[in-house]
Each structure stands twice: as C-alpha cells, then as structure tokens.
Image: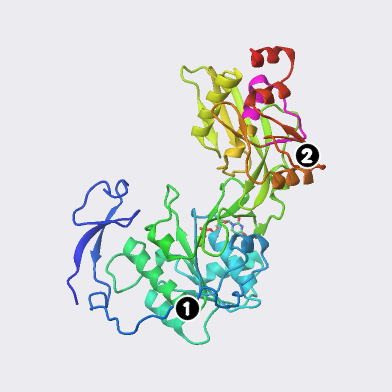
Amino acid sequence: MSKATLSYVCQSCGSAFPKWRGQCEACGAWNSLVEEAATSVPGSSRKLKGNSPIEFSDLRANSTPVARLSAQMPEWDRVCGGGLVPASAVLIGGDPGIGKSTLLLQLAAKLSQQHKCAYLTGEESLEQIRMRARRLGVENSNVALAASCHLGDILKTLEQPDGFDLVIIDSIQTLYADVLDSAPGTVAQVRFCAQELVRLAKKKGFCLVLVGHVTKDGMMAGPKVLEHMVDAVLYFEGDRGHQFRILRTIKNRFGATDEIGVFLMSDQGLSEVANPSALFLSDRAQNVSGTAIFAGIEGSRPILLEIQALVTPSPLGMPRRTVVGWDSNRLAMLLAVLEKRAGVSFGQQDVYLNVVGGLKIQEPAADLAVAAALVSSLKDKALPGDAVFFGEIGLSGEVRSVSQMDARLKEAAKLGFATAYMPTYTAKNKDIQMQPVRVIRGLLKELVGNPATRQIVES
Ligand code: TYD
Ligand code: MG
C-alpha cells in the first residue's frame, strides 16, 4: 500500500497543491481548496503492459444505428437527440429543488413500461420516493428502487448478469468509494465514482443518468473533468418563482447542443409543454408601452418571447441599468448605439429590462426587439400588438441578418402575428408581412412616427 500524502485540491477545477492557499492559482476561485488524501488508485503504480497490438477497423464499415431508448416524453427525447443511447452516460445538473429528482422519477416510470429501470438514491429515503411517486401518479411502475451511497456495493449489483437498461444515480455527490480517504462530494470521490460507473455502463451497455449538484454560482460541483467523462451534460433550470422549467443541452455526443425542452411544474409533477410560445405569451397585456415580442430560436426550435422595458427619469446621478434574462453588457452597447446612431438618449433615465417567463436569452438576434421595447417605453407609445421583432444590431446602427429566419417567421405566423420587423430578406412569405429594417433609425421612424418624435429621430 502506497503512503497516503496530503494535498489540497481545488473543488472547482480539480488542481492539486501541496500547501493550502486562499485562492486557487489555476482557476482563480477563492476558498475552494480542500484537504484530500492523495491515495494512489489501485493498480496505477504498476508498470504498463503492452503485448497485444490493437486492431484498426474501417470507418466505412456497415454498422446498424443503435436503437435509442425513447421515453415517449417528446421534450426529454428531443433534448437527448432522439432518446437515450445505450451504453452512454448523461449528467444532469441544476439548482437544489428545481425538480431533477422529479423529472428522473417520471422518466424511469415511463421507460419502465418497456425497459428495466433502476433508481438509486443517496439523498432520500425509499419512503420519500414512494411518496413522491404517489404524488406523480406513477406508484405502480416497475422501477427498482434502492437507497445506497456505497460505490462498491452499487458496482457489484450492477455487474450482475441480466442487468438494467437504465440506471439513475441521485446524486453523484453522495456516493462514497472506500478506496479513497476523502469525504463524499469532494473532487477525488466524485471523479472516481463517476469514472467507475461510466466504465461499467460502457461495459454492460446500460444508460447511466447521473444527477450532479450545482454550486451557488451555477457551476457543476466537482471538477470540469466530470463533464468530460460523460457523453451528455444537461442543465435543468428555471426560476423557482415560475412554473416553467427548461432542460438545456450543454454537451451531447449524440445530438445537437443548445436544444431545450420546456416543462411545467405543477402539484402533480412535471408536464411537458408542446407549444412554449403560446404559454410564454399567455399573460401578455396589449397596448402597453415597453413590450416587444421577440421571435427567437432555442436550439432547433423557434420560441416567441415577450421582452419588457421600463424607462423612467432617474433621480440618481448615475442612472440605474437592471437586466433580467439578458446580457447587461449587450444592453449598455445597445443604449450607446441608440444614442449615437438614432439620436435617442437614455442618459438621464433608469432602464429596467426583463425577459418574461424566467428565460435567459443569449442570442444577439434579440437586439431589435430590445431596442423597440426600450424606445417604446421611453416615448410611452405602445408597439403594434401584432408585430414580432428580430435582428442583430451592429455598432454603426445597421440591422444584420440572423440565422433561421424562416423558422422564426413560421412560428410568428402560426401564433397569429401579422408583421415581422426584421433584417432585409429576399425569400417570400405569404403568411406574414415582412417589414425589412436596414438601420435602427428606420425602425424608430416606423414605430414612433408621430411628428414630435420624428423630429428627435431625424435630427
Ligand atoms: P425535486 O425533484 O426534489 O428537486 P431536486 O431533485 O432538483 O432537488 O423537486 C422538489 C421541488 O419540486 C419541491 O420544491 C416541490 C416541487 N414539486 C412540485 O411542485 N410538484 C410535485 O409534484 C413534486 C414531486 C415536486
Ligand atoms: Mg433531488
């Protein structure tokens, strides 16, 4: 047995140091070093053997595509790229209480109709899970339940012949491998347990779903290596104050990333939302200034969202800029462009911007909708209720084209919108009137075109 030496391991990036320090030199995180015994992994000190050469095979070989495990939950299946792939590992992260355990229990119940499913928990008692199952109405499903956090026992069980098709571990941070001296949830433990489970999943051919905790700044607890080890990383996010929950792909070796699935949390668990745009727009107030509808794209799917701006005179020397659901740097840039290129000044105004529904938008295509909402609020003039907006705004005030314009137009037309303010586009669309906007000044002229404001805009 090799001598165990102490080292200090950063819990956010996994770097090890011989001495404790307040800040990790590798990733810059503060107070992240934890003392861990660096025991050598059994077998690693042995000399590498290399007797049998590997065999190459041809890329063009005929192989049948793998049959995915379809859960008959369209939102989940789409996020996974068409269903779970056998012999793969999926990591699902999210804030505490967001609904990870609920989602996975519902998934296990669905899949158990055709496959053998196991749900292993280290967080709750079996009675708690049964109670949740009753609440979800899936108490009669054929799901094998176990409460255990001992990795050795779990591996031994899963290795048995005639094993499971789906294994859910809730959560990886509670697992404990007794070959390591560090506590459960530390980087060394999490890494080792995940490695062993993933190895077994590949060997036995089951789908492994790991739940991972998220630290307070939204990172997956444990090192980034955990994300490298698995085939897909999904985040389950949402605002606790809202009912919407969004399942987002961060990484997927078997499908597109940036795909989202939308769920609704109710007292009977999570239900899938097939038409999120209609839901996000359901409480929309008509004829109010400061709101614009953005035709966005999330993954492969178009989603219409309401963007709200409130611009009020500021009593402060330095006006306030508050953004929820969008990038505050992008807002600052847009305000500067509006001032310089369109002559609309927000210098003495507080600006509040909100994306309704608790969604976070990353697309630059939202620029035009945000600009329209801001100016509408500043001038206290409602935008046309049947219009959607999309387009990226450049620093010289030009409106640039964005991806998937057809999909955006189609979704807007489907929901009854009549006009789309958008970048110049040559394709024809008979369902919705396309209103090309070349420069941001042109949009303002169009929208707040009363004589008084026109003077400001054109001066
Ligand atoms: P849970 O799945 O335990 O979250 P996580 O595993 O991500 O920590 O979900 C817990 C929350 O979900 C809890 O606040 C209660 C709520 N909830 C409902 O609103 N309806 C339900 O049917 C269930 C089961 C939970
Ligand atoms: Mg849980």
Cα–Cα span, label 2 and label 1: 54 Å
Q: Quadrant of residue 435?
A: top right
Q: What's the coloring here?
A: rainbow
- For label 2, the SS is loop
- For label 1, the SS is loop
Tell me which residue sits at (65%, 43%) in the image. 296
For the residue marked with disc 1, what is the amino acid?
Answer: Ser
Disc 2 versus disc 1: nearer the observer? 1
Q: Quadrant of residue 374?
A: top right
For the residue marked with disc 2, what is the amino acid?
Answer: Phe
- Quadrant location of the C terminus in the rendered image: top right
Residue reaching furthest to the right: 430
Left/right placement of residue 310 relative to residue 24 reads right
> Of 197 and 148, which appears nearest the observer?
197
Span of residues in magenta = 370-389
Indicate whether 384 appears above or below 155: above
Residue 353: image location, x then y, percent:
58, 32
The residue identified by callout 1 is: 57
Tell me which residue sits at (63%, 32%) in the image. 368
Q: Earlier in the sequence, mark 2 or mark 1?
A: 1
Residue 5: image location, x then y, percent:
18, 65
Left/right placement of residue 83 relative to residue 434 reads left
Indicate whether 387 appears above or below 34: above
Left/right placement of residue 262 relative to residue 11 reads right
Indicate whether 77 appears above or below 391: below
Q: Tell me, yes or no, whether the highlighted magenta stretch contains residue 376.
A: yes
Residue 227: image location, x then y, percent:
43, 60
Tell me which residue sits at (30%, 84%) in the image. 51
The residue identified by callout 2 is: 417
Indicate whether 170 appears above or below 384: below
